Amino acid sequence: MSATALEPTVTRARSDFWPKFRRNRNAVAGSIIVSFVVLVAIFARLIAPYEYDETDILFTWAHPSAEHPLGTDALGRDILSRLIVGAQVSLTVAFAVLGITLTIGIMMGMIAGYFGGRLDAAIMRTVDIIFAFPDIIFAILLASVMGPGIITVIVSLSVVWWPGVARLTRSLVLQLRTELYVDAAIASGTPPFTILLRHFLPNIVAPLIVRASIGVGFIIMAEATLSFLGIGVQEPRPSWGGMIRDGIVSLRTEPYLALSASTALGLTIIGFNLFGDGLRDILDPRIKDR
């Protein structure tokens, strides 16, 4: 099959995307939640009623009021402001990890799937070694060795997440490796990396987008876990995981901090998972129209 022969199919798939998207409840609901969280993160400093590190020792553990809609924490800091800025921190980490892992994972996966041989064996053995450890446990180990901080969170989560992208990319490239248009490109003397970028990457981008959208939920949860354990984002910068940790000590008497951060974390993860599931239903050719 030639690349020209694929164009009508690709064009038709693009024209069908939005009608399918509007009919898919998961995609619509997820996109609404994701859009809201992203907008809050982008304009966090503008919409936060207070500075996230502004303290008032005389006004600690205040109950929700017109002045502080979600109350204050143990240092008198406004919970709503820290919750809003925490969204910015979580999405910054998530998108940084996505950028790193997609770049490394796609590159390694395409090289392994296309060239095979020793390169394939070396890359896949590295992937297998990382997969031998549970994701979050390996991330905790790396973060403990590197020391706490936002850079540590980004690096440790990138290390544990790129192998999954690489394995998925390799399997997709192996499926396309036998297509006639790839053989035609090779026979015409097209350089290998040009083939990978022009012929392989456009045809594997849909499942990678689905994995990325679903993976954001895992990354946000993992970041919150590291911050909850004290080896992630550090004070005074707010993190939903750190806010949950700080709120647990007074959960029975002053539940506002832990509950608000847990709710924000849970809704964000649900939103990205719904969005990813919806994209999978729409973009996966093996799933019939719904």
Image (tube, grey):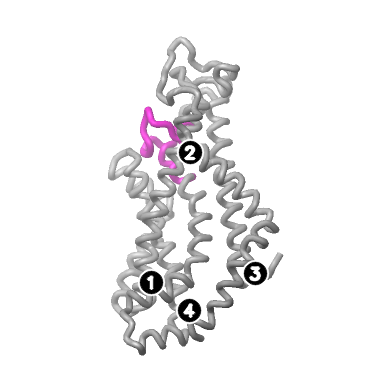
Alpha carbons under labels 1 and 2: distance apart: 33 Å
Alpha carbons under labels 4 and 1: distance apart: 16 Å
Residue found 40% across the figure and 24% down from its top: 53
Residue found 44% across the figure and 14% down from its top: 56
**Are discs 2 and 3 less than 8 Å apart at CB?**
no
Q: Which of the two labelled residues, at mark 2 and mark 3, occupies the earlier sequence position?
A: 2
Total number of numbered labels?
A: 4
Q: Assign the C terminus to one quadrant of the image.
A: bottom right
**Mark 4 or mark 1, whichever is nearer to me:** 1
Give residue 282's position: percent from left, percent from top: 62, 64
- Left of 119 or right of it: where is 46? right
Residue under circle 4?
A: 175
Alpha carbons under labels 2 and 3: distance apart: 34 Å
Three-letter amino acid code at disc 1?
A: Leu
Residue under circle 2?
A: 41
Three-letter amino acid code at disc 2?
A: Ala
Alpha carbons under labels 2 and 4: distance apart: 39 Å
Q: Which residues are magenta?
A: 221-245
- Left of 271 or right of it: where is 85? left
> Which numbered tag is attached to residue 287?
3
Q: Which of the two labelled residues, at mark 3 and mark 4, occupies the earlier sequence position?
A: 4
> Which numbered tag is attached to residue 197?
1
Give residue 21's position: percent from left, percent from top: 64, 59
Alpha carbons under labels 3 and 1: distance apart: 27 Å
Q: Which of the two labelled residues, at mark 4 and mark 1, occupies the earlier sequence position?
A: 4
Q: Which of the two labelled residues, at mark 1 and mark 2, occupies the earlier sequence position?
A: 2
Q: Give the secondary structure at mark 4.
A: helix
Alpha carbons under labels 3 and 4: distance apart: 18 Å
94 w.r.t. 250: above or below: below
